[in-house]
Amino acid sequence: MWISEVFESVQGEGRYMGVPSGFIRTSGCNLRCWFCDTPYTSWTPEGVERSIDSLLEETSCYSAGHMVLTGGEPFLTPEIVPLSQRLREKGFVITIETAGTVYREVAADLISISPKRENSIPRETVWEQRHNARRHRPDVIRQLTRNYDYQFKFVIDEPEDLEDVAAYLGEFPYVQSEKVYLMPQGTDLLLLREKMDWLKPAAMARGWQVAPRLHIELFGNTRGT
C-alpha cells in the first residue's frame, strides 16, 4: 500500500470528535478538491510502500482503541480490505473516511462520507472536468449507507452551499438528519470561527450537526495530527 503517514492523535471531526484515535493515511486520490487540506495525498501525492504487517506492527503500541483509515481516497487501494479486516481482528473500532466514489467490502464500524459538491471543483485547471465527472456516485453512496453505519460530512464555504447540501440529501431521503455534519472550509483558525458564527445556527435550523474541525483548533493545519 502507498502510505502517506501513520500517527496517533484525536479525531477532529464528526461523531467521534475528540476520541483518541490512530490514523493510517493512504496516498492517492481520484479527485482534486481546490480546498484539499492534504494536498500531499492528492495534488502532489507522496508516500512510501508499506505492507499490512508493517502497519499492524507500528500501530500495535497505540493506546487508542479507534483506528481511522483515511486519505487521499483509501477505497482506491484493494489492500484496504484485508487491512481493515486485520485491524478489526486486533480489536480496533474502525472508521473509514471516503468521498463516496468507490465501493469495497471492508470491515468498518463507521463509514464517514464526505461528498464533494460543486463548491469543490478546481476551476480553470486540467482537473476541472475530470473531478466533476467523478465526484458524484449515487450508486456507491447507496451501497455504503445500506451496508454500513455512516455519517455525512459536508465542507461549507459560503451560505449558498447549504441549499446545495439540502438538494443532495434530497436524493437520499432516508438519511437521518443527525448523521449529517457540516464543516467550515478553511485551515485558518480565525476564518473557521467566523464561518461557524453563521454555520452553526443554520445547521441547527435543519437538524444537522456541526463539526468545528477540532484538530485544527488544537494543532493547527499540520501533518501528523
Image (tube, grey):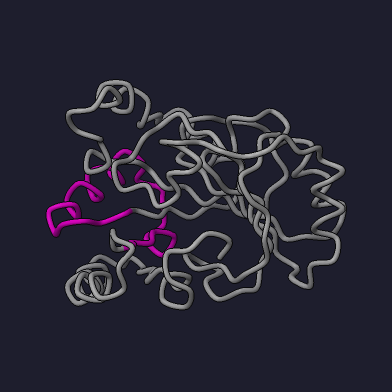
Give coordinates of residue 54: x percent, y percent: 84, 45
Image position of 197 (left or right of 20): left
Closer-to-camera residue (131/6): 6
Magenta segment: 155-183
218 in relation to 94, above or below: below
The residue lying at 34 percent from left, 53 percent from top is: 154
Give coordinates of residue 84: x percent, y percent: 74, 44
**Quadrant of the image occupied by residue 171:** top left
Residue sitting farthest toward the left: 160
Closer-to-camera residue (69/161): 69
The residue lying at 53 percent from left, 34 percent from top is: 28
Q: Which quadrant holds the C terminus?
A: bottom right
Closer-to-camera residue (37/80): 37
Question: In the image, is residue 174 part of the stretch drawn in magenta?
Answer: yes
Give coordinates of residue 10: x percent, y percent: 59, 71
214 in relation to 206, above or below: below
**Quadrant of the image occupied by residue 85:** top right
Question: In the image, is residue 12 part of the stretch drawn in magenta?
Answer: no
Image position of 122 (left or right of 32): left
Give coordinates of residue 134: x percent, y percent: 37, 25
The residue lying at 62 percent from left, 69 percent from top is: 9
Image position of 41 (left or right of 137): right
**Quadrant of the image occupied by residue 143:** top right
How many marks overall? 0
180 in relation to 174, above or below: below
Q: Which quadrant holds the N terminus?
A: top right
